[in-house]
Amino acid sequence: MTVRQVRWAPARFDRWRERGAQLGRALPGSVRPGSVPLGDAALALVPALAAFVPTLAGIGAQIGDLPERPANALGVGLVLAQALPLAVRRRWPAACLAAVGVAFAVHQALGFATTFASTGLYLALYSAGAHQPRRRPALAAAAAAGYAALAVVLHRLGSPQSVPDYLAFFLVLAAAALLGGAVRARRTDEAQRRRTAAEAATTAERARIARELHDVVTHHVTAMVVQADAAQFLVGSAPERAAESMAAVSDTGRRALTELRYLLGVLEATGDAATADPAPADRAPTLGRVGDLVERARRAGQPVEFTRHGERRPHGVDVELSAYRVVQEALTNALKYAAGQPTRVLLRYDEAHLGIEVATDGPAPASVPVARGGGRGLAGLRERVRMLGGELESGPGPAGGFAVRATIPSEPLQE
């Protein structure tokens, strides 16, 4: 017997919630209301037709052993009634079992010859165990009571079967139902695993989006506040420098909007459209734009020294973006907690690792806020770097000040 399983279409992260809800509403292998699968229709026809094939007619389920009655129209109808209801075994499993069970019981009580169609009872029991969604204990109790009633009727009609025989046949029927129940339990577990995976993916994406928003907004807004404060002090004494500070505020705001548009583009991308348009990935901040971060920090009044060691080579988007965010967060903290203090940015390239170090002179700040459980700031960066197999450390430097150091393993992209 072939059990049809629903294939879940791949989805982007913004559809994981919907997929999880669908998994909670239906199990794999379920059938849409109003439909009869072709496989079930064929499965119903096979035992019905095989019952009239001479070489197969005598194979089937039998328990009464009553004197055989000659075949007639009623017997043919009962044969078909034991097989044809299997066409709805997944749509209405309880009704299928009731129809097949009653036909089997009447067929046995009237003493008609065993046919291959009687195997439909096993399939109906399996289907009830595998596909019945509600009132399963009540259905099992009704089936057991019906079998007990059939055993009593057969005994009164003179069946030679003994109590152990009836119990043995009952165990065979129960095994078919239990097999269906085991299949249903496996499907339920699989659906739960898929739903859990979808929820975990949604949670991970929320955390990633929160980190990206924090990195974009905090850095740019901090720089704009510092530049605007500087312009206020210079507007009377040095109007030209005040104008430069205001121009820097405008430039920082436009850069923030650019990065936010990129992030919103990632959020809106779904399905094939996200993979067919590589442009958003090209607009993602990379190590090539670290110089822009340094320049903006300098324009905000922070003396920054920028140094590269080794030959720069392209890396994966995740590595480049993570390294960029490390420098961005460190410079943001320098502007917030050590404004005006000399700061050094060092990028070190080697064969297998990318090293980042941002150190600020002066007294170490009393505390640099680190989000607990929110996945933002230095805590979020540490998690992001660890996911790439790297390490991030932050704390007071040996000569005072504060330093952020990260090492990210990465193979260069092959061109």
Image (cartoon, helix red, strand yellow):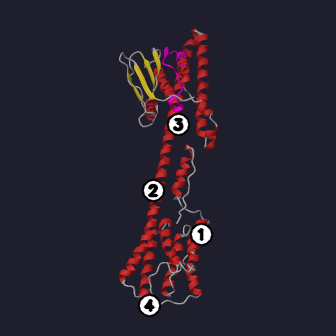
Decide: marks 2, 1 in contact (CB < 8 A)?
no
Magenta segment includes 10: no
Dot 2: element:
helix
* Label 2, residues with CA under 10 Å away: few <14, some 14-19, many ≥20: few
Q: 70 or 380, which lies in front?
A: 70
Q: Between disc 1 and disc 4, whose residue precedes?
A: 1
The quarter of the picture where the C terminus appears is top right
Which of discs 3 and 4 lies nearer the camera? The answer is 4
* Label 3, residues with CA under 10 Å away: few <14, some 14-19, many ≥20: some
Q: Between disc 3 and disc 1, whose residue precedes?
A: 1
Mark 1 belongs to which amino acid?
A: Ala
User: Horizontal placement of 245 versus 169: left or right?
Assistant: right
Q: Residue at x 38, y 81 (%)?
A: 165
Dot 1: element:
helix
Label placed on residue 42: 1
Q: Residue furthest front?
A: 55
Residue topped by disc 2: 189
Image x and y of residue 100, in percent:
52, 77
User: Horizontal placement of 305 versus 239: left or right?
Assistant: left
